[in-house]
Amino acid sequence: MLEESQIVPADERSAGTPLAVDRDEVEAIGTDVTYKAYIDNIKTQTGKGPEQYLAMAKRKGLTKHSELLAWLKTDMGLGHGHANAIILHIKDPELGKKKITEDAKREASKKK
């Protein structure tokens, strides 16, 4: 398991460093990772949002989870968790948008 000090902020990562640590490792140090946080991190690191990945997957004709996962990890350089976050949006864009909205509302209520 990682110590909190071992998690490198996104702006301090070098090229080739995975976008995030394993969810179990994050939970072990008590950090709550939301779907919105995954998507925000992907946008920060790649400059692409879920809609862009959806359009690219459609152009490539990718529909199966396994082929999407392989493409996102191999060609796009996403880690396993981030790839699955994008796959959720590719498979069900409305659910992805709903989860982002719910997470944003939850974040806003915590700040009050």
Image: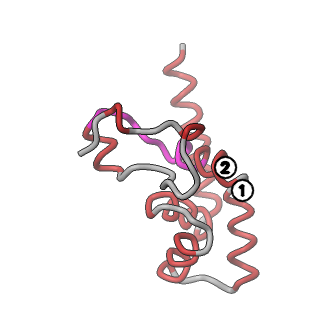
Q: What's the coloring here?
A: secondary structure
* Residue under numbered circle 2: 43
Q: Position of residue 94 (x, y in %)?
A: 64, 58
Q: Is residue 15 above or below residue 31?
A: below
Report the residue at 51% width, 58% height from top: 82
> Is residue 59 part of the magenta span, yes or no?
no
Structural distance between the alpha carbons of marks 1 and 2: 5 Å
**Screen quadrant of the C terminus:** top right
- Which region of the structure is painted magenta? 29-39
Farthest residue to the front: give it.
14
Q: Secondary structure at mark 2?
A: helix
Q: Quadrant of residue 88?
A: bottom right
Q: Position of residue 77 (x, y in %)?
A: 57, 65
The residue under the point 47% across, 81% down is 66
Disc assigned to residue 23: none
What residue is shown at x 70% (from left), y 55% (from top)? 49
For residue 32: magenta?
Answer: yes
Q: Quadrant of residue 104?
A: top right
Percent x, y of residue 42 = 60, 51
The answer to whether the residue labelled 1 contacts the one labelled 2, judged by CB atoms less than 8 Å apart, is yes
Q: Residue tagged by mark 1?
A: 48
Q: Amino acid at mark 2?
A: Lys
